[in-house]
Amino acid sequence: MSGHSVEDIKKSVKIYIGVFASLAVLTVVTVAASYLDLGSGEAFFLAMIIASVKGTLVAGYFMHLFTEKTTILAVLGLTFFFLITLMFLPYITFIDHPAI
């Protein structure tokens, strides 16, 4: 293994096990919340909160969004550049042609 010490790997495994346990607990909470007698608005709000926490855990740890911030920001910047370019490209061609 290149560049990884045993302590780093053990720390990563502990984090992944903790995230897995948190996701398991939140799944049980989701099932338990489905049995609560809530109105549709409250049930939706509770489900969205639980799903947001679970989604943040999955995206942050399993998709490495918490540890690779510079790469993510670079890709986000490049995406924003292409968004602006593609948004204004039709506008430039519209200005180039006179109205009939």
Image (cartoon, grey):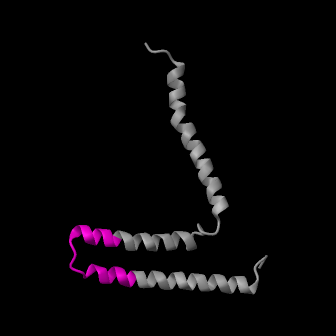
Q: As drawn, is 26 to the left or to the right of 59? A: left
From the top left corner, tell me how far across and down residue 45 is, in percent: 31, 68
Q: In the displayed image of the protein, which residue is found farthest to the top?
A: 100
Q: Quadrant of the C terminus?
A: top left
Vertically, is 85 above or below 73? above
Q: Quadrant of the N terminus?
A: bottom right
Q: As drawn, is 58 to the left or to the right of 81? A: left
- Residue occupying image coordinates x 25% and y 82%: 35
Residue 9 sits in which quadrant? bottom right
From the top left corner, tell me how far across and down residue 77 is, in percent: 61, 50
From the top left corner, tell me how far across and down residue 14 is, in percent: 61, 86
- Residue occupying image coordinates x 76% and y 83%: 5
Residue 85 sits in which quadrant? top right
Q: How many marks?
A: 0
Magenta stretch, main secondary structure, is: helix
Residue 51 sits in which quadrant? bottom left
Vertically, is 63 above or below 18? above
Looking at the image, which is closer to me, 64 or 37? 37
- Residue occupying image coordinates x 24% and y 67%: 41
From the top left corner, tell me how far across and down residue 74 is, in percent: 65, 54
Magenta span contains residue 59: no
Q: What span is colored magenta in the figure?
A: 27-47
